Amino acid sequence: MMRLATFGIILLPLYFAVPALILYFVVKLAVKNAIRELKEEKIL
């Protein structure tokens, strides 16, 4: 039983960190592309 609890303690942060990292990189890429497009259109 102790092994299962230790496994859960290790797995729980990964369960939240992986989607958060994916979301971070998707948003970062979207903002980067949006800024590039605005610069091409001479808005920025």
Image (cartoon, rainbow, N blue to C red):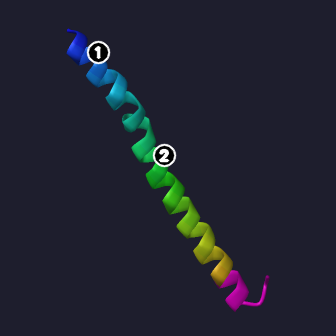
Q: Position of residue 41 (x, y in %)?
A: 71, 90
- Under circle 1, the secondary element is helix
Q: Is residue 18 above or below residue 41?
A: above
Describe residue 42's horizontal placement relative to residue 8 as left or right. Answer: right
Which amino acid lies under the numbered mark 1 shown in the image of this protein? Ala
> In the rendered structure, which disc, 1 or 2, sits on the residue that comes first in sequence?
1
Up the image or down, 3 lies above or below 40; here it is: above
Residue 30: name its quadrant. Answer: bottom right
Q: Secondary structure at mark 2?
A: helix
Q: Which image quadrant for residue 11?
A: top left
Does the magenta-highlighted stretch encompass residue 39?
Answer: yes
Is residue 27 depicted above or below 21 in this figure?
below
Q: Which residues are magenta?
A: 37-44
Q: Which mark is residue 15?
A: none
Residue type marked 2 = Ala
Q: Nearer the viewer, residue 1 or 33?
A: 1
Residue named by callout 1: 5
Q: State the residue at coordinates (50%, 61%).
A: 26
The C terminus: image quadrant: bottom right
Residue, disc 2: 20
